[in-house]
Amino acid sequence: MKTRILGVVALLAVLAAAANALFVVPADLNQGDAQRIMYVHVPSAWLGYLSGGVTALAGIGYLWKRDLRLDAIALSAAEMGVMFTAFAIWGGMMWARPIWGVFWQWEDPRLTTTALLLALYAGYLLFRRLTDDPHRRAARAAVVGLVAAADIPIVHFSVEWWRGLHQGPTIGSPDKLLTPAAPSQFVIALLAMLGAFTLAWAWLMIRRYQLARIQWQLEEHGRLGRLSAARRAATSTSASVQASTEGAP
Amino acid sequence: MTGARADLAIAWAIARKDALSELRGRQAAGSTLFFAALVLLLFGFALGPDSRKLAEAAPGLLWLAIVFGGLLTVARLHQVETDDDALDQLARYPVDRRAIYLGKALAGLLAMAVLGGLLLPVVGIMYSVDLLAAGPGLLLTLLLGAIGFAAVGTLYAGVTVRMRAREVMLPLLMLPAIAPLLLAAVKATTAALAGDPLGEFWPWVQLLAGFDVIMLIAGGAGYGFLLEE
Amino acid sequence: MPQTTIYSAPPNSPLVPIPAVATHEVARLFGGSAALAGVSLSVERGRLVTLVGPNGAGKTTLLRILATSLRPTFGAALVDGIDVVARPELVRRRVAFLAHATGLYDDLTATENLRFAATMLGRADAADAVPATLADVGLAADADRRVRGFSAGMRRRLALGRLLLAEPSLVLLDEPHAALDADGMALVDRLLERWREGGATVMVASHHADRIMDLADGWARLDGGLLVETGGRGIGATAPALARTAPATAVADR
């Protein structure tokens, strides 16, 4: 029930923030309406990073506690990560076309960072599919997730450094929203959208996790069922367990 | 300190064993080197014939060849453990898992360093690059790049060695993960070859070193979990 | 760690020594099927016992769990009272396992393989111990040949040599007579005697039950992942644990 409320609230928040970003906030002087994509692109990218952090932490948690529920969280977060990162890339490309005339370019390499992040997520999810045993899968995925998470800050830092060496275009920069000089209306719109997206992310995570948990419980139920069936079969064929009469402790 | 000393001895023993296997193993290592050199040749076909452009692209092409050869190398170093289920046995010895990781990563480092070192003259000749002008900076970059690649590669090879579709899983996981290493190594190599006009060399080398340290720690922490079933 | 070390002892005999091996409803699932469906047994220290049963009964799975090569899905397994999941590194120091695969490096010689094993096992006297071991298993003449050229029987012998180097207190053997000729089988028998005389506990899973039965103190039959029957001395079925053990994966909602 609480989740449903969260879902409704998230939906309303997203609609409100979107309406605000599209109609209420004035267009950017230089970039025009295209700049509005940033209100969606930036929060998506941030949630992509957040999901990565959750995946890694849940993986570490699994390695420590061996609780498959933590693995279910890691899986859910990874799927969220793919979704939001892909969305961020799409938003970035849609923005780049009118502003720079191309869908992709290398001078502002944040597109590359995000693409690498997407590749890491996609690899993680593909990789999970190739192992059947749940504990082995969880352990391997946790290790891969750990390394990927360690990689993200390095990727980010190295690409920022790379970008710093080449003077990127300043007028058409996606960074405009994040500088202190940005008009407060823009910033508020961005933060509102970020908040709304985060609510949506939380709702999606909870639902995905619940689904994963049900799947896992079904699997577990099936396994235990087979276990008890095996035992019943053995005892019903009148093979009985005999304790030895001498010398056994 | 005896614990750490014993671990290092274990790691060294593993590295030695792998090095011996490599040297005797039916020229598999030589084939990998040959493959990497072929890759360089094919790059020349694909991007040429402007020699000047090729010379400019040389650092990138060198490191791409090292990466492709490296994928084969780290895969092979773990393949030797699966032939007779030796990895299973290795996991049963009463040794610290991090020592096992360190040993295999060390073997990987040696193999990568040799691969890269032997590719340098190939690049020098094929793309008309003056290697001597670069001096020790180039060798340092090579070493740090080899360490980083071996650190990540040993871990991922360990992850994928007993999996289905491991031939594609290893590159699929490794390539995004070593992207920053590739970037930093190429930038540092370019700077070294040009005499470092913009003072970029040391920052990129520091990034490489940082990558190496982080990946070695992550690898050491994670490898043990892969040896259990 | 999810498991704590458990010491099992029957309630009425507080002075009974800790068994070499004790399992409490240990189970292992592979995908859909249960290789072990809940086995509770106990092996007395210093005994030579054999596991019998058809293929797929769970003998190998049980041995692998005791060797720390496999984690149980449910239940617990203890070696010398130490939980194999909680403190595997302590268990590894005590146990040596002869698996189906010999785990050797083809491009190394017999001597190099054993030297490597000796280093891994922490033996400082490798230089002396390795030649002696090779002689013990009848491979002295092939000491410097690469394992790639070895027959299956020779590889087995080398693997047995590796077991000798470990000087374990618990020896686990999975089909040790496989791929061996008459001489080889006699070697195994000799080694079994030697281990027993040395006070080690030995568990052998074997199809050649008749051969082992003469030597063994006791036996246990597994079928379909369950313990069906035991006999002789030194090995017996136990009731589920007196101390409650949390299964390796808990299903109950928390």
Image (tube, grey):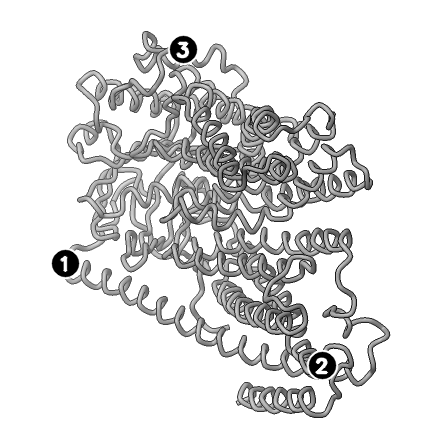
Circle nearer the viewer, 1 or 2: 2
Q: Quadrant of residue C114?
A: top left
Relative to C165, say whether A192 is above or below.
below
Image marks 2 and 3: residues in contact by CB distance under 8 Å:
no
User: Rounded to the nearest whole Å, what is the CA distance between mark 3 and mark 1?
Assistant: 51 Å
Image marks 3 and 1: residues in contact by CB distance under 8 Å:
no
Q: Chain of mark 2?
A: A
Residue at 55% from the left image edge and 56% from the top image edge: A145
Q: Which residue is mark 2?
A: A32
Specify which label sits upstream in the sequence, 1 or 2. Answer: 2
**Left or right relative to A213: residue C146:** left
Kind of residue sitting beneath label 3: Ala
User: Rounded to the nearest whole Å, what is the CA distance between mark 2 and mark 3?
Assistant: 85 Å
Counting from the top left corner in percent of width and height, residue A227 is at: 28, 62
Q: Which residue is mark 1?
A: A238
Given residues C172 and C102, the one toward you in this image is: C102
Q: Residue furthest top?
A: C141
Given residues B51 and B60, the one toward you in this image is: B51
Residue at 72% from the left image edge and 92% from the top image edge: A24
Relative to C121, say whether A156 is above or below.
below
Q: Residues within 10 Å of mark 1 (few under 14, many from 20)?
A: few
Kind of residue sitting beneath label 2: Gly
Q: Residues within 10 Å of mark 2 (few under 14, many from 20)?
A: few
Q: Chain of mark 1?
A: A
Kind of residue sitting beneath label 1: Ser
Looking at the rendered structure, the secondary structure element under dot 2 is loop
Q: Which residue is mark 3?
A: C132
Q: Residues within 10 Å of mark 3 (few under 14, many from 20)?
A: some
Residue at 25% from the left image edge and 40% from the top image edge: C51
